Amino acid sequence: MSSEDRFINIEIKVAHQEDLVESLNQRVYEQQKQIDQLEAMLAALADRIRTMSQKEAPLNERPPHY
């Protein structure tokens, strides 16, 4: 195998690796967006539950007429 063939093979491998890294970066970006959305949804649900539980009377509390 000549030096030129080896150089061409290295260039091909580097090009494939660059493509793979770009694909992985895109996937990480998409996953981070999804994580951010899920965290926002979780925070909203936690606030909603907290608000609802503050409005409702505790289950073991006796009504005022007792």
Image (tube, helix red, strand yellow):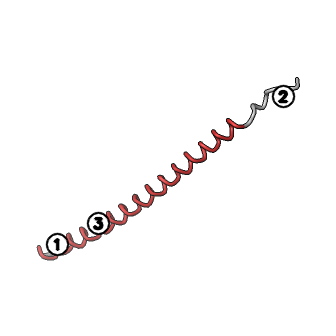
User: Which residue lies under the disc numbered 2?
Assistant: 63
Q: Residue 26 location in percent, x, y?
A: 38, 63
Residue 40 sits above or below residue 61 on the image: below
The total of numbered circles placed on residues is 3
Circle 2 — which element?
Answer: loop
Q: Quadrant of the N terminus?
A: bottom left
Along the viewing direction, whichever of 62 and 32 lies nearer the viewer: 62
Residue occupying image coordinates x 16% and y 72%? 6
Circle 3 — which element?
Answer: helix
Label 2 amino acid?
Answer: Pro
Residue occupying image coordinates x 40% and y 58%? 28
User: Which residue lies under the disc numbered 3?
Assistant: 17
Q: Residue 11 location in percent, x, y?
A: 20, 71
Residue occupying image coordinates x 36% and y 66%? 23
The tag earlier along the polypeptide, 2 or 3, is 3
Q: Residue 16 location in percent, x, y?
A: 29, 70
Left or right, residue 11 beside residue 59:
left
Left or right, residue 35 beside residue 28:
right
Dot 2 alpha-carbon crowd within 10 angstroms: few under 14, some 14 to 19, many 20 or more? few
Label 1 amino acid?
Answer: Arg
Circle 1 — which element?
Answer: helix
**Residue 59 bears which disc, if any?**
none
Dot 3 alpha-carbon crowd within 10 angstroms: few under 14, some 14 to 19, many 20 or more? few
Separation (CA) of disc 2 from disc 1: 86 Å
Q: Residue 19 location in percent, x, y?
A: 31, 69
